[in-house]
Image: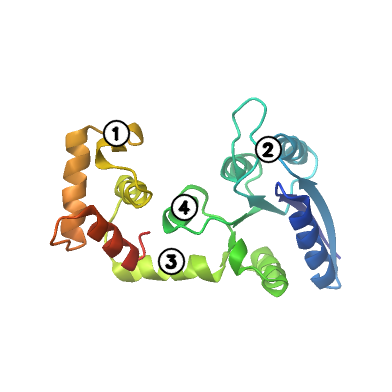
Amino acid sequence: MQHIHILMVDDHPIIIEGYENTLMATKHEDQILQIETANDCDTANELLQRAAIEKPYDICFFDISLPSSSNGKLNSGEDLAKMTRDIMPNAKVVILTMFNESYRVHNIIQEINPDGFLIKSDLTSSELAEAFQHILTTPPYYSSTVNNYLKKTVSANLHVDDINRKILHLLSQGIRTITLREHINLSMSAIEKRKRQLKLLFSVEDGKDETLIEEARKMGFL
């Protein structure tokens, strides 16, 4: 028999219940699932710290948006996933989130390199069941939105570093150039220089930020 130790973290108990029911209903006959759950960073942290000492998790599911820990050190599922990588290096890490902006997707892949990355709007019971078995044996498993984003980015074959991605993301959120310095640790002249380079890279002829955002979106960078 294969004993599989699982942690599920989501701030909506009904969502966790749905995940649990799906996995229990679709597990293989030779699998025994031991599932523990948490709805906030504090509870998840306690469970992770204990498991690291007693019995490490085989697979951990993290929602991104979670109530922060009381000490303010853990503010999201991303923080929990990074910590899990440190204290439980053999555990499979799965991100489940409503966020589907390409900037967030890119960031999560760069920072965490998850074994599974599922966008909730893509998810069905059958896909969750398929993803679970796939991640256990041959990770990674990415849902369709993540895969489409990755294909676009690769096919675009353009080099846009993390700072430039952040500039594009902020501009697309309606942040004006004059206030970008509040979000990015660069001088205004350095930000302006990067914007000029981006407009060259994306062949923006009219010089408008709106056109830059539109072209970046077409190429899968937003």
Q: Is residue 79 left or right of residue 4?
A: left
Q: Please, what is the three-letter code of the amino acid marked with disc 1? A: Arg
Is 93 left or right of 222, judged from the image as shown?
Answer: right
Q: Dot 1 corresponds to which residue?
A: 181
Q: How many marks?
A: 4
Lower position in the chain sequence, tag 1 or tag 2: 2
Distance from label 1 to label 3 (Cα)? 28 Å
Q: Please, is residue 78 above or below residue 134 in the view?
A: above
**Local crowd at mark 3 within 10 Å, few (<14), some, or many (≥20)?**
many
Crowding at label 4, few (<14), some or many (≥20) Cα neighbours within 10 Å?
some
Mark number, residue 149: 3
> 196 or 211: nearer the eye?
211
Do we see residue 219 in this rendering? no
In the image, what residue type sits under mark 3? Tyr
Report how far apart the C-alphas of labels 2 and 4 lie in the structure.
Answer: 20 Å
Q: Amino acid at mark 2?
A: Cys
User: Which residue is drawn at the image coordinates 48% and 47% (left, top)?
Assistant: 111
Q: Choose between 122 and 214: the one closer to the eye.
A: 214
State yes or no: discs 1 and 3 in contact (Cβ < 8 Å). no
Circle nearer the N terminus (3, 4) = 4
Dot 4 lies on which element? helix
Which image quarter: residue 202?
bottom left
Q: Which mark is residue 104?
A: 4
Q: Which numbered circle lies on residue 41? A: 2
In the rendered image, residue 42, in percent from the top left (x then y), is placed at: 71, 34
**Label whose residue precedes the other's in the sequence (1 or 3):** 3
Q: In the image, what residue occupies the spot 71% across and 74% down?
A: 126
Colour scheme in use: rainbow
**Considering the numbered disc 2 on the image, is that residue within a helix, a strand or a loop?**
helix
